Amino acid sequence: MQKVFNNCYDLDRRCYEKFGLTEDILMEHAAEGMARHIRDTCGDKEQLLIAAGPGNNGADGITLARLLHGDFDVSLYLPYGAKSAMAKIQLERFLQLGAEPVQSPPLQADIVVDTLFGTGFAKPLDTKGIDLVDSFNGMEAYKIACDVPTGIDPNGNPNPIAFHADTTITMGALKKALFSDHAKPYVGRIEVVDLGISRTHYEHHTDAFLLTQEDFTPPLRTNAASHKGTFGHLCVIAGKKRGAAVLCGSAALRFGAGLVTLISDRNIDNLPFSLMQSGDLPDTTSAIAMGMGMGYDYDPILIKTSIVEDDIPILMDADMCYVPWIRTLLEKCSKTVVTPHPKEFSVLLKTLEIDNVTVSEIQRDRFGWAKRFSEAYPKTVLLLKGANTLIAHEGIIYINPLGTPVLSQAGSGDILSGLIASLMAQGYTPLNAAINGSLAHALSARRYKGANFSATAEDLIEEIRWLVN
Ligand SMILES: NC(=O)C1=CN([C@@H]2O[C@H](COP(=O)(O)OP(=O)(O)OC[C@H]3O[C@@H](n4cnc5c(N)ncnc54)[C@H](O)[C@@H]3O)[C@@H](O)[C@H]2O)[C@H](O)CC1
């Protein structure tokens, strides 16, 4: 897990006060990090265009121009001039080389480094900025963004457009803006550069963490004297669209639940042999999944009472966001996970009378809304689906950036529910179940070898068998 911050201004200040570093030292390391990346990965390329803005993001770029001048054919372009104190100092140092900034950017370059605006990006790009970013995006070049791609605002939204980076080299620590859904197409690969001090020392407290593959803890079986009851009994409520419950149950079984029963008052035809069905909740139930394909008029009487009385761990997806009695479960049960996509989340916020917001308002501030929900319902783990899935609990947010377009497929959400509920049935805490279920979902998609448009829900379930670490 890596720490993620709103921005680095407080961390920089702490560096000056606690470790006696200066802005100049930090900046030299920022630029040296970019220079190292360019030397290591672009040794065969010659023409380097650096577009530098007026502030310290631009100052990083001017510093980079000095570091690489002589080794590369450097064009330094300053469309807004050099305005911050450090930008002026760095420009003076650049001029001492006998070099000059160019008056207009070359039409083509091998490498384009965007150092126009970083964490100080404060208002929409003006026409000049839009035209520049647009022309850079159209170039066939290797594109590097310094800290944050220009145009991405602090909430991670292109405003109104953004630099399309192949790689973003971010300074000191990861920033939330890089992990919004809207920023995902723009950031490319993300690298963090140390600023004269290890990240361990540079980073401080935060409320957000980035999940990596190394965080994945699969439910490997270590108990040699086990039996099927050792690994829990998941019950999936099968409502109107029974296929959703079958996919959920099949994924849960594949991910290690000892027993999976579909609960329905009607016979379910063509059920896979490994899934059971029942009209009532069995006494051995160790977790419940409900909502997927359930419909909005499901009669909860019996089920709701047993869930609440026995405080059974429960995963709620999809249609559960629409039913007012979700509130009882969220308030009375101590182990709950809710897994909406943005539209369902908008409905859920309304159902729970937290707020009335549109899907696009949610998508423009996913971190903010996820945090707000988790503060209103601290016992519940929220998993907000998206290109970068967010998992929120007690105001802390975990980001899963590993999802791919392979997952944009009917049934994919039912599988995610099954993976998480399977772990809940096996005794994982709701938070660990949400984290590991979400990682398993993304890693299955990454393992899939077919064309990225071709995976069906069944294909994803097949991939689960290979998730050993
Ligand atoms: N630890 C670190 O992250 C370090 C980061 N460094 C770099 O410094 C920038 C942040 O610098 P700052 O001067 O605060 O902000 P910017 O350069 O991003 O921009 C500020 C500058 O731009 C003007 N401005 C803002 N938005 C717009 C706009 N849309 N149109 C026109 N002008 C705009 C604003 O008024 C200011 O003049 C960070 O990203 C890193 O790259 C340092 O290297 C130290 C360590």
Image (cartoon, rainbow, N blue to C red):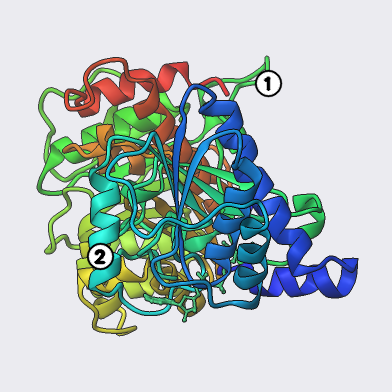
Q: Nearer the viewer, residue 246 or 367?
A: 367
Image height of 112 relative to 82, above or below: above
Image height of 81 relative to 37, above or below: below
Image height of 358 relative to 224, above or below: below
Identify the residue shown where x is 51% and y is 68%.
Answer: 119
Residue 120 x %, y %: 50, 73
**Kind of residue at badge 1:** Asn
Identify the residue shown where x is 30% and y is 64%.
Answer: 158
Determine the image quadrant of residue 104: bottom left
> Is residue 6 toward the left or the right of residue 363 in the image?
right
Residue 167 x %, y %: 46, 41
Identify the residue shown where x is 35% and y is 64%.
Answer: 151
Determine the image quadrant of residue 95: bottom right
Q: Quadrant of the C terminus?
A: top right
Q: Nearer the viewer, residue 436 or 191?
A: 191
> Is residue 95 toward the left or the right of residue 23 in the image?
left
Is the Cβ of the residue at disc 1 closer than 8 Å to that at disc 2?
no
Q: Is residue 217 visible?
A: no
Determine the image quadrant of residue 373: bottom left
Image height of 31 relative to 36, above or below: below
Identify the residue shown where x is 20% and y is 63%.
Answer: 343
Mark 1: few/some/many CA within 10 Å (<14, 14-19, 20+): few
Residue designated by label 1: 223
Residue 346 x %, y %: 24, 71
Mark with earlier residue (1, 2): 2
Q: CA distance from mark 1 to mark 2?
A: 60 Å
Viewer-nearest of discs 1 and 2: 2
Which mark, residue 130? 2
Mark 2: few/some/many CA within 10 Å (<14, 14-19, 20+): some
Residue 225 x %, y %: 67, 16
Q: Nearer the viewer, residue 43 or 104?
A: 104
Tag 2 secondary structure: helix
